[in-house]
Image: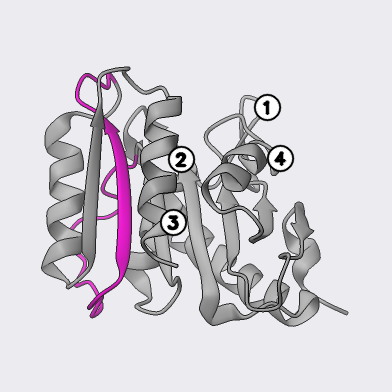
């Protein structure tokens, strides 16, 4: 018996055996299908592992609980981070994709748990695309992230995430050795086409 039934998900193999797998992590109220089109635009031919968060907030799926807007339930976040990491490990075994060739693609709540995974484990991803993330945890000693490529898409006028929050996350990741590229928009918390295009252009440089 596998453990991949612990999280609702979809999987689609890559066009080639050596293609990367993109882990799709939706925003609040999303599903495992939300970011498929974005993944296909950013990484054509890549494998796709779309996951639905196990937490429900007023019927809306999330990856971890929060106490209020922008205030995370840190105990739950840490537990859910471990849960997601174990799920991806199990999925790699079940579906036969290369665990060392997985990129995270997350938006908002999904980007936050992707960042939390990075904060906890150096080699959890080959790279990450984080659209409108926050600092997941403070006071944590980050692992050695030397050379880890990270794209951050952010809104200068995001009503949920102040600019300083984005800059702090970028600084923490860079301070641990990650190679961070931050792209700014002026469309609030929206994930715009131009932001997606910037992420796609960045991803091409990783191939």
Measured Cα–Cα span from mark 4 to mark 1: 17 Å
Pointer 1 residue: 59
The residue shown at (78%, 74%) is: 95
Q: Earlier in the sequence, mark 2 or mark 4?
A: 4
10 Å crowding of disc 4: few (<14), some (14-19), many (20+): some
Measured Cα–Cα span from mark 1 to mark 2: 15 Å
Residue 146 or residue 199, whichever sits in front:
199
Q: Residue furthest right?
A: 1
Q: Is residue 27 above or below residue 84?
A: above
Residue 4: image x %, image y %? 76, 68
Q: As drawn, is 160 to the left or to the right of 173? A: right
Magenta span of residues? 133-159
Q: Are marks 2 and 3 in contact (CB under 8 Å)?
A: no
Measured Cα–Cα span from mark 2 to mark 3: 9 Å
Q: Earlier in the sequence, mark 4 or mark 3?
A: 4
Measured Cα–Cα span from mark 2 to mark 4: 15 Å
Q: Secondary structure at mark 2?
A: helix
Q: Earlier in the sequence, mark 2 or mark 3?
A: 2
Q: Are marks 4 and 3 in contact (CB under 8 Å)?
A: no
10 Å crowding of disc 3: few (<14), some (14-19), many (20+): many
The residue shown at (44%, 46%) is: 200
Measured Cα–Cα span from mark 4 to mark 3: 17 Å
Pointer 3 residue: 114
10 Å crowding of disc 2: few (<14), some (14-19), many (20+): many
Q: Which is closer to the viewer, label 2 or label 4?
A: 4
Pointer 2 residue: 109
Instruction: Answer with the quarter of the image where residue 139 lies.
Output: bottom left
Q: Secondary structure at mark 4?
A: loop
The circle drawn on residue 33 is 4
């Amino acid at each position: 018996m596998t453990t991949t039934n612990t999280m609702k998900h979809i999987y689609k193999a890559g066009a080639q055996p050596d293609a990367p797998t993109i882990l799709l992590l939706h925003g609040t109220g999303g599903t495992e299908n939300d970011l498929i089109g974005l993944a296909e635009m950013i990484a054509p031919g890549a494998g796709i592992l779309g996951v639905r968060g196990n937490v429900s907030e007023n019927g809306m799926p999330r990856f971890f609980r929060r106490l209020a807007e922008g205030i995370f339930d840190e105990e739950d976040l840490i537990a859910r981070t471990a849960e997601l990491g174990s799920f991806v490990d199990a999925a790699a075994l079940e579906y036969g994709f290369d665990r060392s060739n997985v990129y995270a693609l997350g938006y908002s709540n999904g980007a936050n748990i992707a960042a939390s995974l990075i904060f906890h484990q150096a080699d959890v991803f080959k790279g990450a695309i984080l659209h409108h993330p926050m600092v997941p945890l403070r006071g944590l000693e980050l692992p050695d992230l030397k050379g880890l490529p990270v794209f951050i898409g952010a809104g200068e006028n995001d009503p949920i995430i102040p600019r300083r929050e984005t800059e702090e996350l970028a600084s923490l990741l860079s301070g641990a050795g990650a190679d961070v590229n931050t792209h700014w928009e002026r469309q609030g918390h929206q994930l715009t086409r131009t932001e997606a295009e910037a992420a796609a252009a960045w991803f091409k440089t990783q191939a």
